[in-house]
Amino acid sequence: MKKFNTNSIVITSVFALLLALSGPLAVFAAGPASVNLGSAGNFSVLAKSGISTTGTTAITGNIGVSPIAATAITGFGLTMDSSNTFSTSAKVAGKVYAADYTPPTPATMTTAVSDMQTAYVDAAGRTTPTAVGLGAGTIGGLTLAPGLYKWGTDVTIPTDLTLSGSAGDVWIFQIAGNLNVSSGVHIVLTGGAQAGNVFWQVAGQTTLGTTAVFNGNILDQTAIVMNTGATLNGRALAQTAVTLDANNVSTPSLSAPAPAPAPVVAPVVTPTTTTTTTVVTTPVTTTTTVTPIAASAVIARPLINLVKNPSAFFLLAPGGMVTYTYIVTNPGTVALSNVSVFDNECSPVSGISGPSGDVNNNGMLDVSETWTYSCQMNLTRTLTNTATAKGQANGLTAFAFALATVTVDSPSLPNTGFPPEVNSTPWSLIIVAGVFAVLSLYVTRKRGAM
């Protein structure tokens, strides 16, 4: 259990460092790819089991239900169109559709509901979140950059929440519990951020408090409840029912995310483990285990890979020298400048030499080019350290990390039984002492014989 906790702390620390270094670059991030709503995007309100309203609700856009019939749409005073394919309402600046209307409406509604469910699964299945469990589920008063935010609990917004980004940026919120927005609270968009690019995936119920102002597309697996006077600039897409009370609902446009500044593709980076064995002097063996952890800073930023290959050399006496060789590669599509490597154990001691491998001799880490750095230091203990590689392209910075744990088994007896450390007496001392004792006995006997 102790080993597990230590590894967890190391990995958590490296991940925290990654987030900390990524933080200043957040202004360049466009967030995750947008969620495709399909034909569900043609509706301001879409539900499977019913839509009801009281008071003077005003909806700009279409509403519809399926597989339930039109009788599940209440409070709207519907008037059937002569085509019988849709109806109208004084409260809806658009059309009203239901599964029991004249074809092709039933098929259209089946597709829309299917697209709604597909969009929900897509949003819920996104990985590599920007943050997990932010604010322990209470996120009022925060300003959030574009990204993927995930909670395994309810989320409460008791005060105004600001989403800051440009027109093409995307936000996805994955919420495993309920979403509760307090009365009078606003979801504020700044910097050109668009409500059509904000997606709230909620497994529980979404509740908008009285006079709250909410921005974004709600993809809810349960129910959506809007209390008196609440405003939604977005879509209410529920897999059960939507309940309204004198609300304003308007449908924003959906725009694709802006292209990333550098045309690079983020590969999937899989942590690997490399084990090398060096025989120092028979029967003494030293084993060095390296576990690199590499990651790019943010998808669609410039990328850089870093692999650390340490090798250790030892004498029979405890201690020795470790040599780190850093292999830095560029997996992207643009050259990287100002490439450097820093090791928290090695750099403060003697520095890192290199690079070598600049084939074009242009000072740039070209695409698929490999540079090599190296560093040496004395090793008398078990080390767990991190190395960082950094480079720039198109004004953006890419980071890569490697975590290495070097474990040294110095020569020792299996168990001497002598204090203070029963395993600390090396064979070399035993052998020397034995030879000295034999020689002493031989000289003494020789002198006695004379």
Image (cartoon, rainbow, N blue to C red):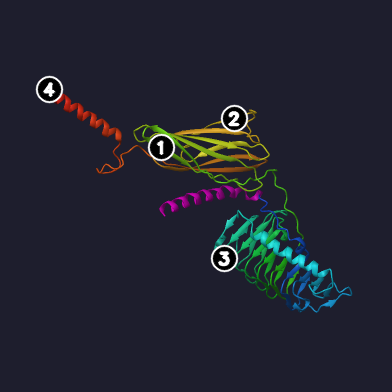
Task: Answer with mark 4 or mark 3, whichever residue precedes in sequence.
Answer: 3
For the C terminus, which image quadrant?
A: top left
220 is higher (above) or lower (below) than 309: below
Mark 3 lies on residue: 153
> Which residue type does callout 4 highlight?
Arg
CB contact under 8 Å: marks 3 and 1: no
Q: Earlier in the sequence, mark 1 or mark 4?
A: 1
At mark 4, the secondary structure is: helix
Numbered badge on residue 357? 2
The residue drawn where x is 42% and y is 51% is: 3
Q: Which residue is mark 4?
A: 447
Q: Report how far apart the C-alphas of labels 3 and 2 lie in the structure.
A: 50 Å
- Report if residue 201 is visible in the image: yes
Front residue of this view, candidates 394 and 420: 420
Q: Amino acid at mark 1?
A: Thr
Magenta region: 1-28
Residue position for label 1: 286
Is 10 colored magenta in this rendering?
yes
Quadrant housing residue 434: top left
State how far apart marks 4 and 2 are (Cα).
68 Å
- In front here: 77 or 415? 415
- Disc on the earlier residue, 3 or 2: 3
Q: For marks 1 and 2, give the CA distance.
A: 30 Å
